[in-house]
Amino acid sequence: MKNTIQKLLMPISILAFFVGILWIGGCAKQASPEGGPYDMIAPRFIKSVPLNGAVEVKDKKIKLYFDENVKIERQSENVIFSPPQITPPQISHGMGKCIIVEYEDELLPNTTYTIDFTNGIVDLNEGNVLEGFVFAFSTGAYLDTMQIRGRVIDASSLENMGNIMVGVYDDLSDSIFTKKAMKRTARTKSDGTFVITNLPKGRYRVYALEDMDRTFSYTQNSEGFAFLKDTVEASPPPKIKVDSTFQKEKQDSIVETKQEMKKEVSKDNSKEQEIILLFSTHLRKTQNLQKSERLFPEVLSFVFSSPLDSLPSLRLISIEKNVPILLELSEDKKEVKFWITDTLLIQKDTLMGELSYFSIDSLEKKYLKKDTLQFIYRASKIKKKKQKVDSLGAKKKVDSLVKDSINSFLLKVEKNTKESIYKGSLKDPFMLSLSEPIASVDTMLWNLFLKGDSLQEKQAFRLKRSLANPRLIELIAEPRYGISYILSLEEGALLGIYGEKSKKTELEFKVEEENKFGSLEIALLDSLPTCPVFVELLNKQNKVLDSLLVQDTLLRIEHLPVGNYFIRMWFDKNGDGEWTPAIYPRQYPEPMYYFPKVCVVRGKILTREDWHWENLALEKQRPKDLERIQKKSSNNRGVRERRNLNEEYIERMRKRFGDRWNPSNKDRKILGLPSREEEKKEREASKNKKKQRKLKKDSISPKSNSEEKLKLKEVGAKN
């Protein structure tokens, strides 16, 4: 009996045991406390072998020691060796707190070497970054200490260029940038600034480079770059005042961190101006035929690699007579369509043609190129089936292949819905788009009325044909704000080149209310060059909304929709109508300037602005409200914007425990909070202030109460 009971209780006891474990585990999980403040302190450099700043160094192995375990993130991107090394030095993490750097190349005599770790050194656990750590030593009797500092900005957007390599040459020849590796390099910070340190006295040529192939020289057209035509003289570093509380060894003086050092530039060095490098990418101009096809039986299409500045010509081969061909140019000027007007030629499945156009060779010189091309048109299977049904049914014969095209011999007329900044304003043109080129227009069959006008009084207008597109026609009238117009076209008002007439059509054109638009007037107060000058209107996303050729020092832009706008101006020195980047070594990028603030356009109001573009440095001109357009370099991956986890920790603790949360003085120091004694004094001071305010209030209140009682007694006596 006893054994039987034990056998029955055994499974129950095992089940209870596991349930208890799960319950305890669940409770423990719910009530688990946090481990305290986070470590947000960067690792600290302790010592090195040889010393930082040592001279007459012969050993190729460098040992760096820190106060905690460290590692190097993305060392190929973050660690910069100067002078550049043919074989990259080996970097190992040693015993956790030690980083070992071993040079593979032979050390040059009487040369200063620097290892710029930028933001590559981080602690092993939390990833806190030791910013701007530089180690230097010399193989000679002294350490070079001169430097060149400056800033790299984008020549077109005037944005600060971060993580761009900047280097110098002591060879002052013009073409050295493409022949040899830079003598000494640095990398720009996020604000575009750079400092090339430990230079010998002398003059240098300075370059910025997006070094894609890591050759430390300009070797590819796709590499962005910047250069100065003049040489730059290296100068002494700014004098640094060290806080009396900051005491460290001499070898650690090169390390500069916000927590440990306060810098003050002496008056002698404050006058030194940083050099400005204008960064751009010179993508060589090319002009090639990318694609040619027969879109429809009557349309031949040609797509080019870049916008055309001169129109191509087409000659059909093996044709006895000259056939009129109409040319249509796309808005981006990259595509040209030729419309064949002869319906007999349209019926042919195959056409041969010779296209003549200006191409650009590798030296960016134009030359006339002729291509002989074959064009074949094949109707789709669906359309071929339809033709068979027609032939079997009512014996309808297809006269030409034009019926197989998208137009199907139906002349369609519709509004041209081109996007424009001036849409709905008096500057918004009334444009009509047709399905095929226009042969003729009968204006007697055109009528323009005000919408809702019961008398249908005709409005005056005239028509203007487009030179670039034979399918467009503009209706020019005298519109007024807040009015809608109805354009009535009778049947046959338009005739296409293939003999088809337009059907009866009514189109509405609406002009918005006047209070939705305003004007902007800009006075250009500095001297303008003799070359063409363009002013561009931008939105917050850097999109060019309009480009205007400056004719006078007073620029007025009317009928702008209400909103915020940005203005930039550039000088077209080569007169090609487009902004041109730098061409090494002969040409700087064309000058670009930004109006430094947003221009606010209000309804029915003229906004006036004065612009002195020469009074403000280029690096300060770009408005802060303009969105950044430069893509972050791959080098930025090593620079992390870290959240302050301790701020989040404080918020969680106060939310969970309220006034009962009382961290230790050690934790308070890490969190940046006052000590317990300081907090106690603050609470007592706050209590004393409350008491004083209450006493002051109580001293005033009895007098006011007695006055109110007297007034009540007087009122009662009168009653």
Image: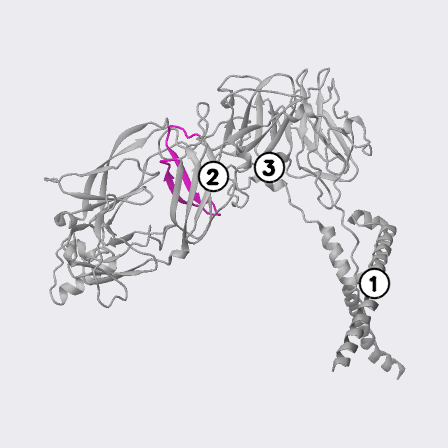
Q: Which residue is mark 3?
A: 191
Residue 53, picture quadrant: top right
Badge 1: few (under 14), some or many (20 or more) residues near its Cα, within 10 Å?
few
At which x and y percent is residue 226? 51, 29
**Residue 614 appears in the picture as rendered:** yes
Q: Relative to 100, is 357 on the left or the right? A: left
| As drawn, 666 above or below 189 | below
**Residue 237 appears in the picture as rendered:** no
At which x and y percent is residue 60? 71, 23
Residue 30, picture quadrant: bottom right
At which x and y percent is residue 543? 44, 45
Q: Nearer the viewer, residue 241 or 294?
A: 241
Q: Which residue is mark 2?
A: 610
Q: Nearer the viewer, residue 504 or 568?
A: 568
Q: Which residue is mark 1?
A: 694
Residue type indicated by callout 1: Lys
